[in-house]
Amino acid sequence: MKFSKLMEEMRTIRDYKKAPVEKALIQEVLDVGRTARGIAENASVLFIENGKELFDKLSGKAGYFGKMMEAPHYLAVVTKEGPGYLENSGYIMELMRMKAWELGLGTCWLSIQDESELKKILGVANTERLTAFAAIGYPYKGIFKKDISEKSSRLSMEEIVYLNQWNNSCTVEQLEQLGFANIIYFAKYAPSYGNRQPWKLIVDHDKIFLTVAEDGKPDTGLDAGIMMLYFEKASREEGISGVWKIDVTSDLYQKYAVPSNYRVVGYYQI
Ligand SMILES: Cc1cc2nc3c(=O)[nH]c(=O)nc-3n(C[C@H](O)[C@H](O)[C@H](O)COP(=O)(O)O)c2cc1C
């Protein structure tokens, strides 16, 4: 399936059948995570098979405000700290979520509330970071066997893109002229913590800068990594190849008038 279709279609699934997922399907999902060329090096993927037995222990440690989600299995990303490690974790987990959706599985990101307890329960070494966590299983569609829940809304393209400088609005027509309209159209579907969509993109010729709000809210690094994945995949499907760079220098803030409550994550170099 094309990534653009997955981006438009995929949504969070919060109810799962109790049945375990067929091993071959899980393997496909894990393979995608383990072979991904993300944003940085060094991440590995963990599969937690016995979700049912671990659910009580995991309660309070992950999920919005500690509200764990019951699922037959869970996925985690484990990594060393280093440049871009959170963005990389977001990228890799989301790539696995997309593969899962393509295979008819449902997933839900679970925000990590108590990382050190979670690491103890899952046997992750103290020298590692457990950065991303998600539930996975067959979606439960209710007794009517029809899933009628809707995808959460998203900001418009104009609300997330600036042209050349912060606060300099960019119309859809301008994006079309620049050849970026389709890319932004699909990238805006990126999911985020609480669906807050904390990103702004600044288009400057052959570079597209990604910034995220740094307002003390959790998981902005993961959110940024998810946007990087969506942008990259949408761009490649448009026939525009590029690569994310994270060598951000402090002069960029002044050059693009980025306010201090936003962080420049990196730029997509075409
Ligand atoms: C980093 C991150 C953490 C999240 N944590 C949770 C969570 O703990 N519980 C939950 O129900 N959903 C969680 N979500 C899912 C978002 O609420 C969801 O992606 C967003 O509302 C958009 O909805 P959609 O994915 O259906 O399009 C999280 C998403 C992200 C990206």
Image (tube, rainbow, N blue to C red):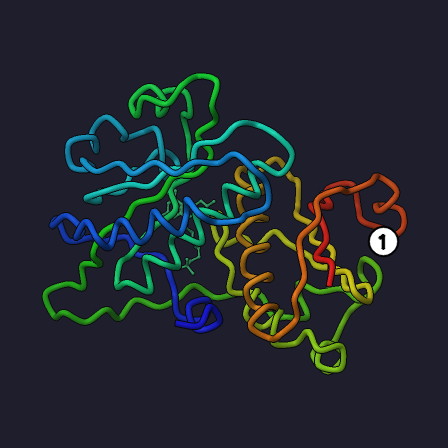
How far across and how far down the image is residue 15, in percent? 22, 53
Place of residue 12 in the rendered image (x, y in percent of width and height, measured from the top left): 36, 57
Q: Position of residue 270 (x, y in %)?
A: 73, 63
Kindly indicate the quadrant of the structure image that contains residue 208: bottom right
Residue situated in front as seen by the camera: 267 or 115: 267
Q: Which quadrant of the view contains residue 11?
A: bottom left
Q: In the displayed structure, would residue 78 be above or below residue 242?
A: above
Quadrant in which the N terminus appears: bottom left
Residue name at image x 16 percent, y 52 percent = 22
Local SS, label 1: loop
Residue matched to label 1: 256
Going 47% across and 34% down the picture, which residue do you hit? Answer: 131
- 90 or 197: nearer the viewer: 90
User: Mark 1: is the Cβ under 8 angstroms from ligand 1?
Assistant: no
Q: Residue at x 59, y 48 (%)?
A: 224
Left or right of 85: which side holds 74? Answer: left
Question: In this rendering, would 245 be left or right of 193?
Answer: right
For label 1, count other residues whose C-alpha is less than 10 Å away and answer few (under 14), some (14-19) or many (20+): some
The amino acid type found where label 1 is placed reads: Tyr
Of the pair 103 and 210, the residue shown nearer to us: 103
Relative to residue 214, is residue 54 drawn left or right? left
- The residue at the point 53 percent across, 40 percent down is 219
Task: Out of 63 and 107, give the one closest to the viewer.
Answer: 107
Give the left or right position of residue 149, taking residue 243 as reference: left
